[in-house]
Image (cartoon, grey):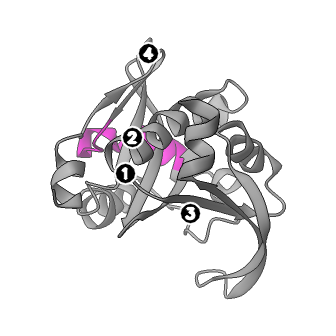
Amino acid sequence: MNMSVKLAEHLNFETERLKLRKIKMADATDLFEICGNPFVVANTGSKVDANIIETKENIANYFIPQGLSIWALELKSKQKMIGFIELHVNHDQGEMGWMLNQSYWGHGFAPEAAICLRDFAFQTLNLSVLTASCDTENPKSSRVMEKIGMKKVGQTWNYLRLEEQSVLSDYYVLVKNEYEEKYE
């Protein structure tokens, strides 16, 4: 079955505390709390949204067109979007990334969502490799990667176009046979 079809058949997921669903224009205020916060956006290569209009433009121009690869993280108890997670698939490999509202850091939401997509990537999409990277100055994201079973395999320089500089990033990998040994 075509990978896009598999992704399209799984537009929504639920974990204990989160709904993973598609981002919509009604999420603009919640998304601005994330993408308008320079501390959250730091070292991601993304531009800080200056106002809600920019956030709406990003929803229309990026989040909705990338719909098969990006999920909003909605906190079920508050019915509030508190972040988003991405899974970009290229043949049998996937790359994950996430961003979370700073008010919700340290509560285990990122690993909870990442575990959900990790399992989907290996069990449903039958990917061989899952990767993620983060700035070396971002130990919280490194911990998320480790919590979902990824191993740091090295470092690489990533060019941040908007900041016109390169940053050293930690590169993490989880391969399918290690996933199966550990989690199935």
Q: Earlier in the sequence, mark 4 or mark 2?
A: 4
What SS does tag 1 mark? loop
Q: Quadrant of the N terminus?
A: bottom left
Residue 47's x, y, as percent?
55, 69
Q: Which residue position holds label 1? A: 126
Answer yes or no: do the residues labelled 4 and 2 have beta carbons within 8 Å?
Answer: no
- The image's mark for residue 48 is 3
Q: CA distance from mark 1 to mark 2?
A: 5 Å
Q: Which residue position holds label 4? A: 78
Check disc 1 and give the amino acid type.
Asn
Q: Earlier in the sequence, mark 3 or mark 1?
A: 3
Q: CA distance from mark 4 to mark 2?
A: 30 Å
Q: CA distance from mark 3 to mark 1?
A: 35 Å
Q: Residue at x 76, y 50 (%)?
A: 142
Q: Write the start and end of the magenta stretch as one range.
A: 21-34
Q: Mark 4 or mark 2, which is nearer to you?
A: 2
Q: Earlier in the sequence, mark 1 or mark 4?
A: 4
